[in-house]
Amino acid sequence: MTYSLPNILSFLRVLIAPFVYQMIRSGDHSLIIYALIIYSIGAITDYLDGLIARKWGNTSSFGSFLDPIADKVLTNAALLGLMAIGVIAPWIIIIIIGRDIFITLLRIYADRNGMPIITSTSAKIKTAIQLSCSILILLILSLESGTQLIDSFGFVVDITMYVIAFLTLYTSVEYCFQNKQLLNHLLLEPRIPGLKSMIATCFGIGYSPFAPGTIASVMSILVTILPISHVQLQIATVIAIILAIPSIQYVESLHGDDSSVIVIDEVIGMWIILSMDFVVYTPAILVLALILFRLFDIFKPFPINIINRKKGAFWVLADDIVAALLTIIFLYGFMIIQIGSNLLLMR
């Protein structure tokens, strides 16, 4: 990947997705207005990145891969937020996100095997409708009487979501028919080695030629979009660690010790931070946690630098776990200072 403007715009949509979700989920009138503004900017970048890439000759295979994924992350973040406040039915979200995960994994597999998938026209139409409907609903909710208007015209929202659900299923079938050869190739692959590669590279993120560790850390924050508690995330983190060790061992046998394609350790590190009970999922805390974790992971101060010299799957995880623990200590200190400052101001 080059530091081209189209790719930066695409990546921007991934970065703002968790904040859009949190703002919508809050149900706060003023925050929904901010969510509308940020989400609209993201939708505009979806149009601009392709236009700029074609006009400036900055098209690339990585850009073609990143653009639709960024669209999915941003649109689904908004839809999940609307589901959280009861505007959209959960079963529709399950269909949409299930399809997007399937197509994304298929796209990663296709790129790895030199058989890239071209985004279909119907899929682009579906995404455009999702973006437009989400913006319209957020615009209504930003009004003082927005909730009442949504309740009064809920049937219109339902019909629109049914149309989106239909297009979602249609494009899934369309992709399967258009990529029959790729699917046949996938079905013939050995299951366990392929699964280990997917886990260690976090479903192909590790194959990114640009900052795979940072991208994986950012993507790991998307877990906060899900209706998941801190305890549930702690359980998910433990399961991830158990699955990660044999997966890292396998990928290291192919690509060498602590290969850059291994990014599950960054995901686990961020999940450890986010699973702490005192960590609230506000935009400021999420950004601070991400920055601190990446600084510790990149510069590797004591004792991370000592751990990093050791070889093996356990130690690949260990340095990120220690980076996560140091981040937790700094975050906890930040929380105490913030609480103390608030108490002083109350006097």
Image (cartoon, rainbow, N blue to C red):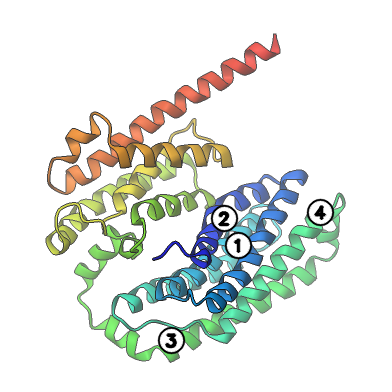
**Residue 49 placed where, x, y %?**
57, 70
- Reading the chain from its start, which is encountered first: label 3 or label 1? 1
Q: Nearer the viewer, residue 234 or 181?
A: 181
Amino acid found under the numbered disc labelled 4: Thr
Q: Among all residues in the image, which is located at the extreme front? A: 56
Whole-number angstrom distance, CA of label 4 to CA of label 3: 39 Å
Which of the marked residues, 2 or 4, is nearer the chain's N terminus?
2
Q: Position of residue 285 (x, y in %)?
A: 53, 36
Q: In which quadrant will I find the N terminus?
A: bottom left
Camera-near label (1 vs 4) is: 4
Q: Secondary structure at mark 3?
A: helix
Which mark, residue 17?
Answer: 2
Give the numbered dot on residue 176: 3
- What crowding class fits label 2: few (fewer than 14 Cα within 10 Å), some (14-19), or many (20 or more)? many
The amino acid beneath tag 3 is Cys
Checking the image for residue 147, the label placed there is: 4
Distance of label 1 from label 2 (alpha carbons): 19 Å
| 4 or 3: tag closer to the N-terminus | 4
Q: CA distance from mark 3 to mark 1?
A: 25 Å
Give the Cα distance between marks 2 and 3. Answer: 28 Å
Report the residue at 35% width, 30% height from top.
Answer: 326
For marks 1 and 2, the one nearer the N-term is: 2
Q: Which part of the image, by quadrant, shows the C terminus?
A: top right
* CB-based contact (under 8 Å), mark 3 and mark 1: no
Residue topped by disc 1: 90
345 sits to left or right of 195: right
Quadrant of the image occupied by residue 291: top left
